[in-house]
Structure formats: structure tokens, C-alpha cells
Image (cartoon, grey):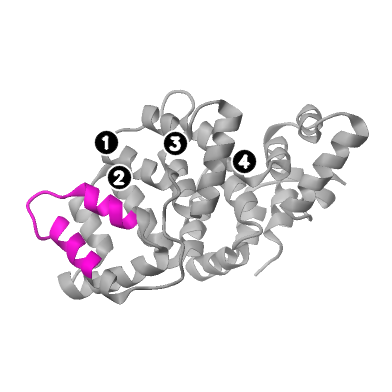
Amino acid sequence: MLISILAERSNAQRQLIVKEYQAAYGKELKDDLKGDLSGELKNLMVALVTPPAVFDAKQLKKSMKGTGTNEDALIEILTTRTSRQMKEIGHAYCTVYKKSLGDAISSETSGDFRKALLTLADGRRDESQKVDEQLAKKDAQILYNAGEKRWGTDEDTFTEILCLRSFLQLKLTFDEYRNISQKDIEDSIKGELSGHFEDLLLAIVHCARNMPAFLAVRLHQALKGAGTDEFTLNRIMVSRSEIDLLDIRAEFKKHYGYSLYSAIKSDTSGYYGNTLLKLCGGED
């Protein structure tokens, strides 16, 4: 009953259910779910009744909690959210943890990686659908001058362009970059940069070109091999279920030759697996 109600409603509907539950029983639905369920099923059900911005804020907090930071999770969340979503996440983070997201990122990361994350967390990426060909040519030349053409790399330039331009604009810029340098921007980033900063910029390139494909790869990594990365699996399934999960499913099938549905089915079990399959929606 829980699965059929919560996994088959939109988040907006689930928020109304949460409100009505509180009014009728004087209790938080999430608290009752936590009290009655356990393990990954509990985590997934609680995620489903959490408002999206609060859910992302909590995922970011978890990524930075304790010893060691889960950089992959930080990168994935900050590169795939829109500017508006980032502003909402920042607000939610502040409300829940009484600390700004920027301060949290600053205390857990360093160097160029920190600078780029903070730029993304600011939610200042251009979201317009307009593409400026002249700007793409100019940016491509600036990137070339900042990397391939000089001794040492001007990291700030890479951060500025890749973290603030719209994805549509970046796609054109990467085409122009290839014309100028005879190299793919990805190869230049791999050759010029390193560590988590390199990972972050490559994630932006992949998202600009094809975000569902980027997330399909993340899901595949979470499901393959021994043991499942439920933290990543739950996050992507819950956060993308109403955005681009159908596209992610199509990319998954295209890349790996089998469906996301069958991958989840063979890697998870019980009520937890059933809930994920409901969210997945169907076999491709």
C-alpha cells in the first residue's frame, strides 16, 4: 500500500499528502515512515516525501559529513541542477542546517575544485535558450589561450566559462574549440588539469552535451559490480523521476544494451527493489 501510493504520485502530490497526514494525525509522515521501516526502503520512502530542494540539501550534507568527502556526489548534484534549483537548495540548506551551503563547501574542499563548486552553488549559470555564435568563438579562443596554448593552465578561466555559460552556449563553444585547437575540449581538460577539479569540468562537458547520458553512466556505476551504491541510486531515481528519467532510460539501453529496469531488478530485491522499479516505470 505504501509503495503503490508514494511511488505512483508526483512530488507535488506527495507534499499535499504529507500536509493532510499531519492535519489528520498530528504527526509527520516522514517520522512514521522512519519508525516503521528500515534500511534502504526507509531511506527511499523518506526521500519520496521530502521536498526536492530539501532532499538535495540533505544529500549535499551527507556528501560532506564525517571524514572524507563524497566528491562524486557533490559534482553530480551541482552540475545537474538548474540555477533556480541551486538557489532553492541553498535556501533549504540554510534553513535546515543554519549554515550556508557556501560555507559548508568551503570547509570541506579546497583549491580550484572549491572555487568551481562555489560558483555552481551560487546558481548563476545562464539559463537562456539563446545562443551567441560570436561569444562561442571568443570563449573557445579564451579557453585555448588559457590551456593548450600556454605553459601552465589558467584554471580560473575554465571555471568562469564552464560554470556560468548556458549548456546550449557551451555546446557551441566546444564545437568552436575543436575548430581552433583540432582537439576535443575533453582531451584538453584531461591533459591540462587533474584531480577533482578535472572530474568536475568533465562532468560539466558531459552534462552540456547530453545530461541524460551522464546520469545513465552514474546509474550504471552505482549498479555494476559487487555491492550497490544505494546513495547514488536512490538520489538519481528520486530526483530525476519527473524530469528526464525516460531519457536516462533510453540512454542506458543505448549505452549498455540492456534496460535500466532489468539492471535494477537483478541488483536489488524485496520492497526496496519494487519501489525502485515503480519509479523506473517500465522495461525498455
* Mark closest to the chain's N terminus, 2 or 1: 1
**Amino acid on which disc 4 is placed:** Phe
Residue 267 position, x and y percent, is 62, 49
Residue 208 position, x and y percent, is 41, 63
Q: Choose between 264 and 14: the one closer to the eye.
A: 14
Marks 2 & 3, CB-CB < 8 Å contact: no
* Mark closest to the chain's N terminus, 3 or 1: 3
Q: Which residue is mark 2?
A: 197
On residue 111, which mark appears?
Answer: 1
Q: Which residue is mark 3?
A: 70
Q: Which residues are magenta?
A: 138-162
At horizontal 69% and vertical 33% (from top left) the residue drawn is 39
236 is higher (above) or lower (below) than 19: below
Q: Which residue is mark 4?
A: 55
Viewer-side label of 2, 1: 1
At horizontal 44% and vertical 43% (from top left) the residue drawn is 121
Marks 2 & 1, CB-CB < 8 Å contact: yes
Viewer-side label of 2, 3: 2
On residue 143, which mark appears?
Answer: none
197 is higher (above) or lower (below) than 58: below
Alpha-carbon span between mark 3 and mark 4: 16 Å
Viewer-side label of 3, 1: 1
**Amino acid on which disc 1 is placed:** Gly
Alpha-carbon span between mark 1 and mark 4: 27 Å
Alpha-carbon span between mark 2 and mark 1: 9 Å
Is residue 99 rendered to the left or right of residue 163?
Answer: right
User: For residue 43, which quarter of the picture?
Assistant: top right
Secondary structure found at label 2 = helix
**Amino acid on which disc 3 is placed:** Asn
Specify whether residue 81 is in view.
no
Overall secondary structure of the magenta stretch? helix
